[in-house]
């Protein structure tokens, strides 16, 4: 059931290389974005938070305060095959995670916490993709 999320991740992940320099995220920490979903990948590096902000900005998914832009995120997820079945859920999970770390003032540190929370909650909700599923759809984007 991580099918839809595999498309979103494959597309979103294409922006990683454009964001490597400005985020300072090394290939040693995260070589390919789809590894974000690996069981043994720990979502802890501040630079990953900076990279996610940079990547999200490529698709206008954030507001000026580096919090999610709900409408744009909704539309982005809906643009993928069967995206409408996931968009509401994904926006809800991310927003719930944002609320838990709202007092953190460093945007990169806060976003990596939000992303780690989202990874856990997406797995629990059964919407997280397998890395193999992402690799299978990479060529489409
Ligand atoms: O408050 C900042 C909100 C940041 C939203 C992004 C969180 C999840 C990023 C990590 C996983 C990405 C996988 C697919 C793309 C989802 C947009």
Image (cartoon, grey):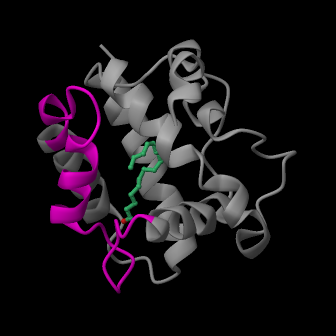
Where is residue 87? Give x, y as percent.
Answer: 18, 41
Where is residue 7? Give x, y as percent.
Answer: 41, 30
Where is residue 33? Give x, y as percent.
Answer: 63, 41
Question: Residue at coordinates 30% horizontally, 54% vertically from top-left?
Answer: 97
Give residue 39's quadrant in the image: top right
- Left or right of residue 71: residue 101: right
Between 79 and 43, which is closer to the camera in this rendering? 79
Quadrant in which the N terminus is drawn: top left
Please determine whether, in this image, residue 133 is positioned above or below residue 24: above
Counting the numbered discs, the total is 0
Give residue 56's quadrant in the image: bottom left
- Left or right of residue 87: residue 134: right
Please determine whether, in this image, residue 88 is positioned above or below residue 48: above
Where is residue 11? Give x, y as percent.
Answer: 48, 42
Give residue 43's quadrant in the image: top right
Question: Residue at coordinates 75% horizontally, 44% vertically from top-left?
Answer: 30
Residue furthest front in the image: 140
Please determine whether, in this image, residue 26 is positioned above or below residue 83: below
Query: Quick check: is 65 in the magenta stretch?
Result: yes
Question: Residue at coordinates 35% horizontally, 71% vertically from top-left?
Answer: 62
- Left or right of residue 32: residue 64: left
Between 102 and 139, which is closer to the camera in this rendering? 139
Query: Quick check: is 5 in the magenta stretch?
Result: no
Please determine whether, in this image, residue 72 is positioned above or below residue 136: below
Which residue range is magenta in the image? 59-87
């Amino acid at each position: 059931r991580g099918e839809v999320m595999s498309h979103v991740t494959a597309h979103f992940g294409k922006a990683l290389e454009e964001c490597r320099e400005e985020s300072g995220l090394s290939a040693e920490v995260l070589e390919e974005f789809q590894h974000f979903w690996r069981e043994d990948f720990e979502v802890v590096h501040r630079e990953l938070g900076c990279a996610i902000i940079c990547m999200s900005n490529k698709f206008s998914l954030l507001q000026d305060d580096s919090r999610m832009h709900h409408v744009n995120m909704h539309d982005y997820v809906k643009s993928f095959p069967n995206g409408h079945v996931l968009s509401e859920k994904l926006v809800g999970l991310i927003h719930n995670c944002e609320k838990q770390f709202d007092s953190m003032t460093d945007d990169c540190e806060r976003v990596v916490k939000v992303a780690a929370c989202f990874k856990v909650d997406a797995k629990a909700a059964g919407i997280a993709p397998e890395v193999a599923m992402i690799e299978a759809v990479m060529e489409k984007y």
